[in-house]
Amino acid sequence: MANLSRRSLLTTAATGTAAAFVASSAAGTAHAAPSVKDTPVDAQGHDPVPLHWLEGDTPAALTGGATWGVPWPRGAFATGQPFALTTADGKDVPVQSWPTAWWPDGSLKWTAHAVSADAPRDETYQLSAGTPAGSATPLTVHRGRDTITVSTGVVDVAFARGGDRLIASITRGDTVIAKDGRLLASTQDRPGTDGAPVVRSDNFVGFVGSVTVEQDGHVRVVVKVEGKHRKGRRAWLPFTVRFYLYAGSDAIRLVHTFVFDGNENKDFINGLGVRFAVPMRGELHDRHVRLGGDGDGVLAEAVRGISGLRRDPGATVRQAQYEGRATADTSTWDTRVTSRLPYIPAFGDYSLAPLNAHGYEIHKRTKRGHSWVRVDGGKRANGLGYVGSPTGGLAFGMRNFWQLHPTELAITGAAGDQAEATVWMWSPRAPAMDLRFYHDGLGQDTYPEQLEGLEITYEDYEPGFGSPYGVARTTELTFWALESTPTARRFADLAAANATPPTLASSPAHLHAAGVFGSWSPVDRSNAKKAALEDRLDTMHAYHRDQRDQRSWYGFWDYGDIMHSYDGTRHVWCYDVGGYAWDNSELSSDLWLWYHYLRTGDASAFRFVEAMCRHTGEVDVYHLGKYQGLGTRHGVMHWGDSAKQVRISNAGYRRFHYFLTGDERSGDLLRELVDADRSFLVLDPGRKIREGGAWEPDPKALGVSTTTDWGALAMAWLAEWERDGRAVARTKLLNGARTIAALPNGWAQGGTISYELASGKFTGPSEPSVSVGSLSSVFGLIEVMTELIGLIDEPAVTDQWITFCRLYNATKAEQRAATGTDWGNLNLRQAYARATALAAEHLDDAALAARAWTELRAGAAGYPDSLSFTAQRVEPPAVLNAVDEAPLSANASAQYGLAVIQCLALVGDRIQ
């Protein structure tokens, strides 16, 4: 491949401009697209791409709009190509489009697209090259000295450029619907659960550090606000909040991220929320509260109720209040009611709080200082509330509301001039967060003692390493500035959108035809052998997905992850046994689940892995501090294990989400990892087994492995290169691949191999030797190399990699003949069947293809053909709750899933 940047490729490939396409200057997104002038390539011959709502049916409501990603085959379109969207019956739909990735030849690889809730809606759409329809309602951004105001044509949202308010006001016409949007955090100095009284409590407010308009288009505007929570001289808990606004919409979507940078032994967070002030208008009996319950359930109340009284104001009046409409003037009521209105209690405060995943309670009170009255309860609330009147009000909600418990929707002061609506991401009603390590070290003060502990519980403990400093959590919220109290049906529709934001998707067939994400293929049941494997994949996926609910894998810090291993004696997953507890992406469970979605297009599969991606990319990875860029190995606590590794922070696990959804936060996570190789200056991964003197890291000779470590780093560099980001990413990616391939035995080379930080190059022995570990390629190395050799014209790299794939499961004689020595007794042979399949496909070798299927079906360190995937039901009193159990584990399922998927894609025509 010629040593040309994508920018120069695009410059020489095209001229002119396509203003309808939102490129970097219009979008305001750094590194979003090359700033070149180009014209679309000839679009003839490119069929429209069918799109559908992920959940199938046409949604009744959106969270302002929808944004999704679409891939394109190499060479199909240049970066300036505009795209048009139409409904199934041919109606034009205003769409905003922008590039998110490019092929090495400069053509578009991925684009993101956005539509507004105000646009024509249908069950399916067609996306094609062409001029997009303009938005019927103008979307504008006004940059003032103190505020940045976004006008959607329905609402005006004023973002404060500084101070303790993120949003100064939300107005609809001449009515202020909400104002003073703030971030809240509160702490106490002790957990309050171990008998020691809390001595000090502090309340913090988020202060704005910067406001950036990241995207300014005709359909969608994105505003990013960054800052920290402050009280007095202390500033901590850095946050990033993105606000999404769409043309013609009254919704404001928030993606809220905070990073914990406190002392887990002193800082116990007991409240974390987003609050708006809501001006109250009208009489108390015309002020309404709505809270969503299970499914379509809606609690409909007024601040001062006028039904169920001893005296009746009349059926028409009662029904109007119940439905949220303005009641008739009180002069038309029965005077026996109107004269006694002051004696009817006005309930100004409401709370709906799911403190666990299996139930919530609703309470209300008249005001602070008085008792709460229980209203009702239920199992799983959908997370939406409303406070306002027939002249307007605010709906406010949180996605994954009960899944991320303990949460709360709170309304206070609705009987006064101004109510407060708060979404508590951590409810003050719950015990405080206790992020301390879960045991006292058990005497494991030395490395030999810690290695002994590893032998019994599989936990790699080390004092001081189980720190949460630098871990993060991202939460999605939506607010609607409504012109009036919504009907029950409308509120239920909004609640459904809040709980499961509708999104558009292209089919597995299109995703596959575009040639993205390496070796995989859509579901194929064309013969009995393939159908049997497809059944196994579906059964295995459903089992792990259903275990989440059966085992209650929910909670603020846990939701999205799965467990590593099963304890058949107790009939529980090993939630309390060291390294067998939370999975933390071990052996690429994220990759398996993403590929399962790609090939099936199943909505439940997408939602399952999306939740995992939100978790593993935030909670299991350090975003600040000395471990920044590293992830934590599997364990009882997500940050507890002392093994901090790039194989867990792996960008490959987030890359799918970014390209499929255009999610900016996932884009942040990818970019954070471009410099993850610097972590090898900070932490010695081999410290517990190293012999010799003190560890002194040399930036010119770091101990980065050419397999597990480099594969994870390469994923980050590949993503950055695709996104036309920092040039160093492409440089390091290609330098690493070339210099590893130049070693006598490539990725199998043994001896002392050193990594140069500045260039990404490896140096090592000139004489062949071998060092191969079973884990070498099961954290994404196979997947990233499959993609890389398809992107670059580097025969030496391809040949060396295919040799590695061919030899891993080869006979010892074959290994000796090729590398001078055999590779020992390697494990995970079923997982490496996909490496054999890649070699077979590349070499067009039928014998290798047959060997791949033999390896897969033998099931070494995995699932043999003889294993039954059938789950058995276990009922109380043998267990606490009825559960299903099957002979499956996260590690084996992930690697079996990847092996089957890739064998079907690569050598499916030679299935045995």
Image (cartoon, rainbow, N blue to C red):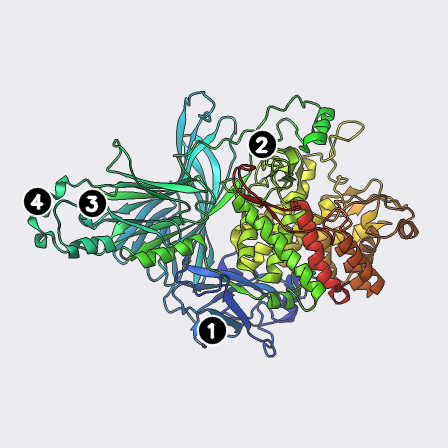
What is the CA distance from the residue labelled 3 to the residue labelled 1? 48 Å
Please, what secondary structure does the residue beneath circle 3 have?
Answer: loop
Ranked by sequence position, the earlier of labels 2 and 4 is 4
Tell me the kind of residue under disc 2.
Answer: Ser
Q: Residues within 10 Å of mark 2 (few under 14, many from 20)?
A: many
What is the CA distance from the residue labelled 1 to the residue labelled 2? 51 Å
Q: Residues within 10 Å of mark 1 (few under 14, many from 20)?
A: many
* In this rendering, the label closer to the viewer, 2 or 4: 4
Answer with the quarter of the image where residue 536 lies. bottom right
Looking at the rendered image, the quarter that the N terminus falls into is bottom right
Task: Determine the residue located farthest toward the bottom in the rendered image.
Answer: 44
The residue carrying mark 3 is 304
Please, what secondary structure does the residue beneath circle 1 have?
Answer: strand
- 699 vs 536, nearest the viewer: 536
> Which residue does the image show at 44% across and 74% down from the upper left?
92
Ranked by sequence position, the earlier of labels 3 and 2 is 3
The residue carrying mark 4 is 339
